[in-house]
Amino acid sequence: MRRMTSLADLKFDNSFAALPEGFHSRVTPSPLAGTHLISVSPASAALLEMTPEQLCSEQAMAWLSGQIPLPDGDPVAMCYAGHQFGYYVPQLGDGRALILGEVCTGSSGHWELQLKGSGLTPYSREGDGRAVLRSSIREYLCSEAMHALGIPTTRALCLFGSEEPVYREGLERGALLVRMAPSHVRFGSFEVFYYRQRFDRLRQLADYVVDHDYPHLCDLAEPHAALLGEIIQRTATLMAQWQLVGFAHGVMNTDNMSALGLTLDYGPFGFMEAYEPGLICNHSDYQGRYAFDQQPAIGLWNLTRLAQAMLPLLDADHGETAAERAHELLDLYKPALSEAYIGGLRAKLGLRDAQADDYALAQRLLDLMADDKVDFTNLFRDLADLQVASDDQDAALRQRFADRARFDAWAADYRARLRQEQSVDSERRAAMHAVNPRYVLRNYLAQQAIEQAEQGDYSEVERLLTVLLRPFDDQPGMAAYAAEPPDWARDLAVSCSS
Ligand code: AMP
Ligand code: MG
């Protein structure tokens, strides 16, 4: 790959900023006092055809942290609305973020560079426009970890710390995350124009999204219906992927749902540890609306809000014909979700062939894990060690279950199933290791990195990033990063203030 020599060599397009007023507001970043670089993700830098070293030049850092304007940038804050906890909020928008500019690369397409924590915008409402170090570290690490797990997500290019005081529950320090995605358009970006009855802008937005990110739909007879259909499919797959890796998003408001089917806006998220289907990782979610096992249903609820907002695009009179079309498309969701989820469960169990009872077999294991509070990530990873012809390796697995006889009964049925397809231990083990990660961003790991960073030591952020960028490889000397939470961390509460 050809390497750029400087950020100044990048080609900018700024296509979202080129949309008319109403889609966004022009803003200038307000730099933070004492900004300093904490970390650069080499994986994201590579997408811009740059090495981390090239990004670390003084000039690049000043550009990326908003200290001086990017020569070809055109910073704007996006305007959007959204349903928050089931209720429509007519105006949200980037209250503490801005699109710095859109980079066009030769090899990896276009990337909107977004600053998060860059100061007040016209959409800040009562907020201060800032982000604190702890939540920025969490988003930085999790974006890159999710990508490495093979899950569509916004990316994180680099993270800055600062001396700027920011008040949340107490005094904290401000931080700045540079994240990137082909586009940050959300379901709420459509909703804002639908509820304002600005159907001209709604159409313009849909045209923009098709041209910019779904070019293969451009020449279809009904590109907007096709767009909705594809967002439905992508969201269904994304929900399946979250469930399969034990990721709970925590705040699935429609303003946090990407029109590209990406994981977007990392707040009080969590990875499943002791398996608990009803896990609520957002401590402000008193009703459990966004509990782990609700995510697939909420995905559909949110898509229904998007479909409603797109009704005027589905049929000229957006009456009954449009509603019927929307229902037809929404009906794609459940089959797409089941296919991705059941296929994913099969892969987690190392099953090659598809059989009718596979879902039941997987669900029985999940029920066992829930009853005995077994660690989700480690159980699936270590299940790869089971041998078809002998139960010599079972001791390590059995000891994770309180009800060992129940596990033995399940393991006997699993072995019988494996024998039916002549499963080969070594092959199955490799295949299972490629889908069941050894390392995920456990809350306590993030917490340790945060506490050290708050003392000015960023080495743990760096180490954790390195481990999480290769989640499927057993990494020598890194066993501690696969350890189940220590006692002090079992009930670690993640504040939703950020
Ligand atoms: P979130 O729950 O983080 O997705 O944010 C919901 C809305 O609140 C978005 O419009 C954010 O831009 C806005 N917001 C969150 N925190 C702040 C803040 N500290 N200052 C200004 N706006 C904020
Ligand atoms: Mg948000």
Image: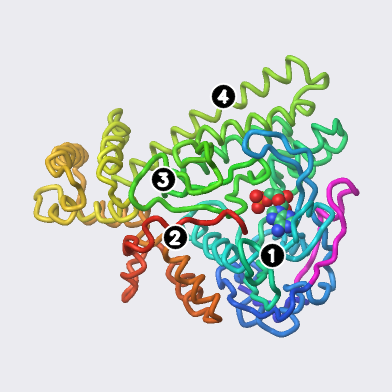
As helix, strand or loop, the secondary structure at mark 1 comes to loop
Instruction: Tell me residue 80's x, y (percent).
Output: 77, 44
Q: Earlier in the sequence, mark 1 or mark 3?
A: 1
Label 2 or label 1, whichever lies nearer to me, is: 2
Q: Is mark 2 within 8 Å of ligand 1?
A: no
Disc 4 residue type (three-letter): Asp
Residue at image mark 3: 244
The kind of residue on which mark 2 rests is Asn
- Residue 478 inside the magenta-drawn segment: no
Residue at the limit of the structure toward the top, as seen here: 320
- Lower sequence index among marks 3 and 4: 3
Which residue position holds label 4? 331
Q: Measured from the top left, where is residue 127 in percent x and y?
A: 74, 56
Q: Is residue 183 visible?
A: no
Q: Earlier in the sequence, mark 4 or mark 2?
A: 4
State the image coordinates of residue 241 (x, y, percent, origin top left).
47, 45
Please name the amino acid that badge 1 sits on.
Gly
Q: Residue at x 52, y 52 (%)?
A: 269
Circles 1, 4 touching at the beta carbon (< 8 Å): no
Give x and y (percent) for residue 132.
Answer: 63, 66
Residue at disc 2, secondary structure: helix
Rendered residue at 82%/19% (across/down): 317
User: Residue at horizontal 20%, vertical 37%?
Assistant: 417
Determine which residue is flagged by label 2: 443
Q: Label 3 vs label 4: CA separation?
A: 22 Å
Say if mark 4 contacts mark 2, CB within 8 Å.
no
Mark 3 touches mark 4? (CB < 8 Å): no
Which residue in the protein does label 1 denote? 106
Task: Single out the mark in the foreground, 3 or 4.
Answer: 3
CA separation, marks 2 and 1?
Answer: 37 Å
